[in-house]
Image (cartoon, rainbow, N blue to C red):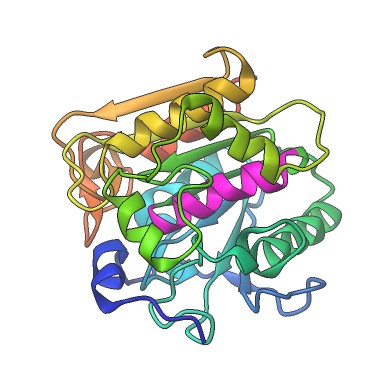
């Protein structure tokens, strides 16, 4: 059993209540990562699929309407696919973004998520797929963009980590603090994505990075690392966007006063609706 310290679990945990009903999908193909799968499908024409990756100590049901995404799904005709971690995999219910057996193409958790996407695409007949996540879920979203780039049109990493930053728990601590040794060059950060993608030679997904400048758990430096990493892969900044939220701490930004989500543990009333910004970025091209 993979273990993650209680401290990391508490630092990356999120809000824990649900207001809508998700549909659990028990059979979706190969599941080497032993993950659970949930969906939300609005009652209108589906224009795309958004994979949402929750944070530690959360469940899929904590990461839909609470952060404003079901509203975006209903507005834009976006089906939501929500993978869910299990305590058997990780006692803190964190996606294992630092375990090589779970972040290498065709193995573990990333392979399970790919199976879920294949299932939903076939079921809904939609080819447009996007991905976003918070913190540990943001790190795994970034890894999915790197290991399965052909699956995604775009992705958004909220308070996440760069690809290649950690391959064990010790690395994870350093990565969260914004430190790697030896310190990689921007080229080496880009190479980490290219290496994870294997023989991929297609169009890379567009990437948005959202991070609070006062993040006390996942150092804001990581936002710059992710931005530079993907800018190196794309060869320019045209398809990479960084949103820095001045003074905002660790969490998913919402704007309850304007009908976007509700504040809770690591769901922050920042006067900024990240779900809306991300949805608009996804559908901008």
The image shows residue 113 at horizontal and vertical percentages of 68, 61
The image shows residue 180 at horizontal and vertical percentages of 37, 45
Give the residue displayed 18% in from the left and 39% down from the top.
Answer: 248
The image shows residue 42 at horizontal and vertical percentages of 62, 52
Residue 197 appears left or right of 63: right
Question: Magenta stretch?
Answer: 135-149
Residue 242 in the image: above or below residue 275: above
The C terminus sits in image quarter: top right
Residue 50 appears left or right of 59: right
Query: Which image quadrant for residue 255?
Result: top left
Residue 38 appears left or right of 273: right
Closest to the observer, 170 or 132: 170
**Residue 59 counted in the magenta span:** no
Residue 246 in the image: above or below residue 193: above
**Residue 142 counted in the magenta span:** yes
Magenta highlight: main SS: helix
Give the residue displayed 46% in from the left and 65% down from the top.
Answer: 168
């Amino acid at each position: 059993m993979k273990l993650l310290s209680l401290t990391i679990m508490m630092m990356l945990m999120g809000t824990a209540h649900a207001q809508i009903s998700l549909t659990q999908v028990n059979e979706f193909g190969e599941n080497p990562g032993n993950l659970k799968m949930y969906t939300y499908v609005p009652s209108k024409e589906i224009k795309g699929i958004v994979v949402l990756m929750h944070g530690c100590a959360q469940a899929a049901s904590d990461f839909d309407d609470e952060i404003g995404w079901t509203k975006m799904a209903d507005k834009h005709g976006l089906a939501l696919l929500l993978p869910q971690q299990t305590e058997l995999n990780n006692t803190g219910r964190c996606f294992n973004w630092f375990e090589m057996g779970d972040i290498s193409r065709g193995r573990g958790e990333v392979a399970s998520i790919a199976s879920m996407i294949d299932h939903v695409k076939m079921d809904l007949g939609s080819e447009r797929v996007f991905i976003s996540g918070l913190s540990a879920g943001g790190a795994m979203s970034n890894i999915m963009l790197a290991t399965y780039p052909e699956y995604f049109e775009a992705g958004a990493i909220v308070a996440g980590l760069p690809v290649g930053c950690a391959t064990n728990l010790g690395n994870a601590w350093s990565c969260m603090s914004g430190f790697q040794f030896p310190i990689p060059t921007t080229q080496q950060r880009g190479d980490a994505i290219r290496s994870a993608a294997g023989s991929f030679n297609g169009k890379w997904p567009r990437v948005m990075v959202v991070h609070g400048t006062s993040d006390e758990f996942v150092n804001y430096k990581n936002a710059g690392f992710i931005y530079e990493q993907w800018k190196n892969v794309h060869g320019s900044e045209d398809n990479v966007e960084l949103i820095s939220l001045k003074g905002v701490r660790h969490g998913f930004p919402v704007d309850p006063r304007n009908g976007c989500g509700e504040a809770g543990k690591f769901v922050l009333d920042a006067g900024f609706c990240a779900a809306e910004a991300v949805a608009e970025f996804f559908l901008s091209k």
